[in-house]
Image (spheres, grey):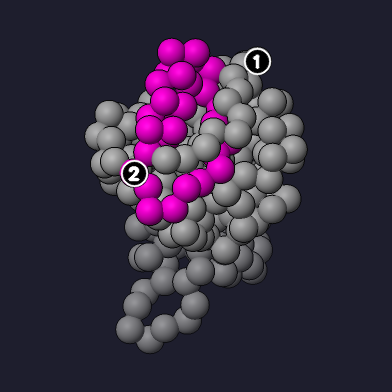
Amino acid sequence: MRADRALRVVLAEDSVLLRDGLTALLERCGHQVVAAVGDAGSLTAAAGAHDPDIVVTDVRMPPGFQDEGLRAAVALRTARPALPVLVLSQYVQRSYAADLLDSGDGTGVGYLLKDRVGQVEEFTEALAAVAAGGTVVDPEVVRQLLRRRRDPLERLSPREREVLALIAEGRSNSAIARELVVSEAAVGKHIGAILTKLDLPPAAETHRRVLAVLAFLRA
């Protein structure tokens, strides 16, 4: 299969076998692998030296074999938002995957699980789409990112969490004040802060106190 447009590619993959295989595949498709490297530092250097049309990188690479490749990709996109980057991984690294997909203006970026590489046509189509400014995300990545919900209570102070827990138990403001040995006015201020931080603006058709309890129970 020949590519409609020949791309200059910087490839980063620590496995020599997979790196050589990807290089052969890309060149067979008509692309030029201008650098094939095995660690994140070399990826950053190669991208700067060769000004490629696209970067293809693994997530886990030396020295720590954690998320060095993905972090390097995010840094490259921060420095050059228009640089197309396609990340390949055996798993979903959710913390930096979201950062990668948010980088630049959200275009020219892709995140695929390595299983897709075995589906040559799908991989080459994804490569071309990302290089052309598209966004390609593996369905499993989408599913896992959608499941990554921020704790809605993380913005609350420890005291506000205590107040909300007591509200969830059905306590009145006066009962909460007695439990915490504070004034009812202080409890009222805490509740106001809780509702604000949980983005529960006044609304006649909803009971904000109930919604706050629901947020507490979900968390």
Write the start and end of the magenta stretch as one range: 2-29
Q: Can you say whether 24 is above or below 146 in the image?
A: above
Compared with residue 54, is residue 202 higher up or lower down, i.e. above or below?
below
> Residue sitting at 56 percent across and 43 percent down?
8
Residue 197, above or below 19: below
Mark toward the viewer: 1 or 2: 2
- CA neighbours of label 1 inside 10 A, class few (<14), some (14 to 19), many (20+): few
Towards the viewer: 102 or 149:
102
Image coords of residue 80 (percent x, y)? 69, 53
Mark 1 secondary-structure assignment:
loop
Residue annotated with mark 2: 2
Q: Residue at x 33, y 32 (%)?
A: 117
Residue closer to the observer: 30 or 187: 30
Q: Above or below — where is 198 with respect to 200? A: above
Work out whether residue 117 can be spotted: yes
Which residue occupies 74% across, 40% down?
Answer: 48
Dot 2 lies on which element? loop
Queried whether the magenta region covers residue 9, the answer comes back as yes
Residue 162 spot, x, y in % from top left? 54, 47
Q: Quadrant of the N terminus?
A: top left
Residue 209 percent location from the top left of the image: 42, 67
Can residue 126 be seen in this snapshot? no
Q: Residues within 10 Å of mark 2 (few under 14, many from 20)?
A: few
Q: Nearer the viewer, residue 46 or 197?
A: 46
Q: Residue furthest bottom?
A: 204
Which badge, 1 or 2, is on the more N-terminal residue? 2
Q: Which residue is mark 1?
A: 63
22 inside magenta stretch: yes
Q: Amino acid at mark 1?
A: Pro
Quarter occupied by residue 28:
top left
- Residues 32 and 188: in front is 32
